[in-house]
């Protein structure tokens, strides 16, 4: 394999070329992250007139708070469910779309569309379908089947609703990657297996699925990161963390405590914890997935 | 050639002068950041325009900065950057934070410093008292104030053979129990729903029954305040609502107003407790039934119920701006509190007029004869002078505390906790927040 690499005669030019990107990253990521880190060790009033350095007090209070630990658990359940639902459906749809014979381009485009919808809008859409007072589907189900559905009061209903709304959006994203992954599976392998008498299901499990594993891992990590952060808009429009705090995931708690409640020390500490989590996940991804990924080309 | 140059120079000079002269006389700009959108925002603009047209020294710019919390956040960021506006609208739950911020110029002082001798006794006292400090000095200018009332579906009442409710004398909660039972019997899907449950069922319930919401005079007299809402009376009230859920005499429609309001408009609920500022929306949305407004129910033992308390927002003045600006700010606040502005504000938005003068004017104009339901809230609010328990709430991290109360109430409604357990936990959790807040301001 040939390695492509550009050589610069002067050492300053390459640095100059990456400078704009570095500046943007510094201004919009490192600087705020640093500020957050500093704020997480402080106790401060919103206007910043009284600021005291309190070492790890904010973190200690945080981890002594049973509700924060509960929020951790809620986040895990939520992310796990979103990952499971959106990966299963994404994979299923990709497999089907890969075999579609007619109107492939149209089908694929239509399937990708939901990803272009902002999370908050997706939340509002689902609310209009599933709200017990004015949700079309919720009211219809209640009338026809007598289904007692109330996400305003029942924790499990609320969780189901936000999982559905988040997954629906994320299925499209996963679909794109699975479809690309499926198309990279060599046809010859599948044909050979078919000639050996393997049925479609067997071919999928023993050939396609293992070859898809890098995609699967990548998609899992991306979905988890999505559900940690991007789902904010959905939670905000659908449940606001309720009922009884049962859908209050970590990122929503950061918002509630910091933006609404103006408790900057605690919410900074929470975002630092979140950042650490994401760094951990990303490191794991690079360590274990990067090795298995086959880059062809 | 020379002549030509001379002509050019005079031309340039006149141009510069003609530009500079109006620049010297340009009005001082006063910035007001607010959260009033849609029709309310238009009314704000009308009041601002009438001030700007009435004089030429100052020009007020009313700028919509988003929802309440976004406006406060914008204000916080602006103060930190030294670019604060003159006037900031902040919701009532942020009162303590604003008051302690060290960034504000108290309104009573601003008015006095600029030569306005305001007779504060000519204002609606339960509105003022929410924004006064412990010494009774007004810290911020009340702007949009509302209070909860009870809406009811007159058609459903007729069908159930119930008489219409009085606009002055509140029904008792026991009577309401019978009313809702009759409604259900007559085929109604549900009885009562309530918006903003913490505000209407805990905060206002406590105020109207003269029960302390928190120690230290509801927090007015010290940061070392603790919540007291796990008392028998509040717990029993919550337990009663919970017991009504068995036959749908009461049911839960959500924390804010959208759900409960939708239930009322869809005629699923015969009674609906919410802010008077919902009148406009109900007027617009309800086409197929008659409705009316009644004061909030009280307990039978409370023969002389106290005033209800307000919700809404007030205007805070930031310090650190040029002295001559504040003269304009004071003039604008004076204009805002004027009868004409207040009458317009009340008529167009449903929020209270804040002065007795404006209230009298509205009465004289026969406004309340035409729209009697508009007066229910104001009568309920002013029926007695506020006590220490009913003048308002002064708590740090109040937004989180409301959230906590909402969460715990939801756990009662869905059967996870008994009312007593829930209120105990609400007190415990809120007190932890209050201690955190106290630590910040030590």
Image: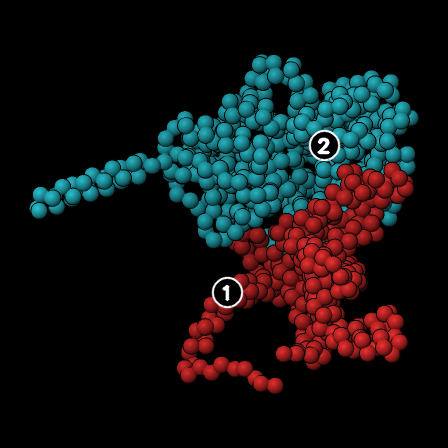
Chain colours: A red, B cyan
Q: Chain of mark 2?
A: B
Instruction: Tell whether A254 sits left or right of B109.
Output: right
* Among the 4 quarters of the image, the one containing residue B347: top right
Q: Which residue corresponds to the image point at 70% horizontal and 35% vertical from the top-left? A: B389
* Among the 4 quarters of the image, the one containing residue B355: top right
Tell me the number on the disc at residue A230: none
Q: Which of B233 and B337 lies nearest the eye of the viewer?
A: B337
Q: CA distance from mark 2 to mark 1?
A: 47 Å
Residue B245: image x %, image y %? 87, 37
Q: Is residue B221 above or below residue A190?
A: above
Residue that label 1 marks: A24
Instruction: Tell whether A40 sits left or right of B13.
Output: right
Q: Which of B364 and A238 lies nearest the eye of the viewer?
A: A238
The quarter of the image holding the C terminus of chain B is: bottom right
Q: Nearer the viewer, mark 2 or mark 1?
A: 1
Q: Which residue corresponds to the image point at 87% horizontal and 34% vertical from the top-left? A: B248
Residue B75: image x %, image y %? 53, 47
Q: Chain of mark 1?
A: A
* Among the 4 quarters of the image, the one containing residue B419: top right
Q: Residue furthest left?
A: B2
Circle 2 SS class: strand
Residue that label 2 marks: B274
Q: Which residue corresponds to the image point at 43% horizontal and 73% vertical from the top-left? A: A16
């Amino acid at each position: 394999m040939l390695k492509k690499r550009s050589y610069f005669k002067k050492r300053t030019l390459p640095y100059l070329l990456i400078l704009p990107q570095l500046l943007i990253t510094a201004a919009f990521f490192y600087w705020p992250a640093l500020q957050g880190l500093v704020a997480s060790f402080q106790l401060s009033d919103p206007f910043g007139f009284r600021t005291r350095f309190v070492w790890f007090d904010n973190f200690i209070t945080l981890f002594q708070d049973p509700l924060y630990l509960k929020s951790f658990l809620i986040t895990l359940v939520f992310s796990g469910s979103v990952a499971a639902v959106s990966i299963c459906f994404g994979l299923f749809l990709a497999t089907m779309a890969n075999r579609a014979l007619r109107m492939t381009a149209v089908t694929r485009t239509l399937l990708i569309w939901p990803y272009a919808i902002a999370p908050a809008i997706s939340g509002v859409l689902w609310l209009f379908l599933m709200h017990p007072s004015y949700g079309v589907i919720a009211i219809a189900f209640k009338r026809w089947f007598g289904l007692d559905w109330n996400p305003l009061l029942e924790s499990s209903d609320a969780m189901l609703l936000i999982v559905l709304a988040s997954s629906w959006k994320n299925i499209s994203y996963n679909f794109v990657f699975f479809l690309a992954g499926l198309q990279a599976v060599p046809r010859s392998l599948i044909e050979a297996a078919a000639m050996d008498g393997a049925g479609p299901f067997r071919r999928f499990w023993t050939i396609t699925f293992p070859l898809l594993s890098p995609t699967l891992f990548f998609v899992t990590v991306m979905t988890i990161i999505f559900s940690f952060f991007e789902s904010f808009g959905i939670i905000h429009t659908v449940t606001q963390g309720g009922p009884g705090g049962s859908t209050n995931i970590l990122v929503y708690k950061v918002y509630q405590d910091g933006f609404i409640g103006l408790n900057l020390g605690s919410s900074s500490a929470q975002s630092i914890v979140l950042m650490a989590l994401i760094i951990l996940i990303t490191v794991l991804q690079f360590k274990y997935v990067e090795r298995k990924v086959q880059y062809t080309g | 050639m020379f002549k030509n140059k001379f002509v050019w120079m005079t031309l340039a000079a006149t141009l510069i002068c003609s530009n500079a002269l109006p620049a010297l006389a340009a009005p001082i700009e006063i910035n007001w950041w607010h959260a009033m959108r849609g029709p309310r925002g238009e009314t704000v603009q009308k009041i601002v325009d009438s001030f700007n047209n009435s004089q030429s020294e100052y020009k007020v710019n009313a700028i919509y900065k988003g929802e309440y919390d976004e406006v406060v956040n914008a204000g916080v960021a602006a103060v930190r950057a030294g670019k604060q506006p003159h006037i900031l609208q902040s919701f009532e739950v942020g009162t303590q934070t604003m008051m302690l911020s060290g960034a504000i110029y108290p309104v009573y002082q601003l008015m006095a410093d600029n030569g306005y001798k305001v007779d504060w006794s000519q204002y609606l006292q339960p509105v003022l008292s929410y924004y006064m400090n412990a010494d009774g000095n007004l810290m911020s200018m009340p702007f949009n104030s509302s209070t909860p009332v009870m809406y009811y579906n007159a058609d459903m009442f007729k069908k159930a053979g119930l008489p219409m409710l009085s606009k002055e004398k509140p029904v008792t909660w026991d009577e309401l129990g019978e009313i809702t039972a009759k409604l259900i019997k007559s085929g109604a899907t549900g009885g009562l729903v309530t918006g903003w449950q913490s505000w209407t069922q805990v905060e206002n319930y406590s105020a109207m029954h003269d029960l302390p919401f928190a120690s230290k005079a509801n927090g007015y007299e010290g940061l070392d305040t603790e919540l007291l809402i796990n008392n028998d009376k509040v717990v029993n009230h919550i337990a009663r609502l919970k017991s009504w859920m068995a036959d749908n005499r009461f049911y839960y429609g959500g924390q804010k107003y959208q759900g409960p309001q939708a239930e009322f408009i869809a005629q699923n609920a015969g009674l609906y407790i919410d802010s008077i500022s919902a009148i406009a929306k109900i007027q617009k949305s309800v086409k197929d039934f008659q409705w009316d407004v009644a004061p909030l129910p009280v307990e039978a033992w409370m023969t002389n119920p106290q005033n209800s308390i307000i919700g809404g927002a007030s205007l805070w003045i930031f310090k650190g701006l040029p002295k001559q600006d504040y003269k304009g700010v004071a003039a604008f606040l004076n204009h805002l509190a004027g009868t004409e502005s207040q009458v317009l504000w009340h008529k167009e938005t449903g929020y209270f007029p804040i002065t007795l003068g404006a209230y009298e004017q509205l009465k004289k104009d026969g406004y309340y004869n035409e729209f009697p339901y508009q007066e229910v809230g104001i009568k309920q609010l002013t029926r007695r002078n506020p006590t220490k328990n009913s003048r308002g709430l002064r708590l740090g991290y109040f937004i989180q505390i409301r959230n906590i109360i909402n969460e715990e109430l939801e756990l009662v409604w869905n059967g996870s906790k008994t009312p007593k357990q829930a209120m105990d936990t609400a007190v415990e959790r809120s007190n932890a927040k209050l201690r955190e807040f106290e630590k910040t301001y030590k």
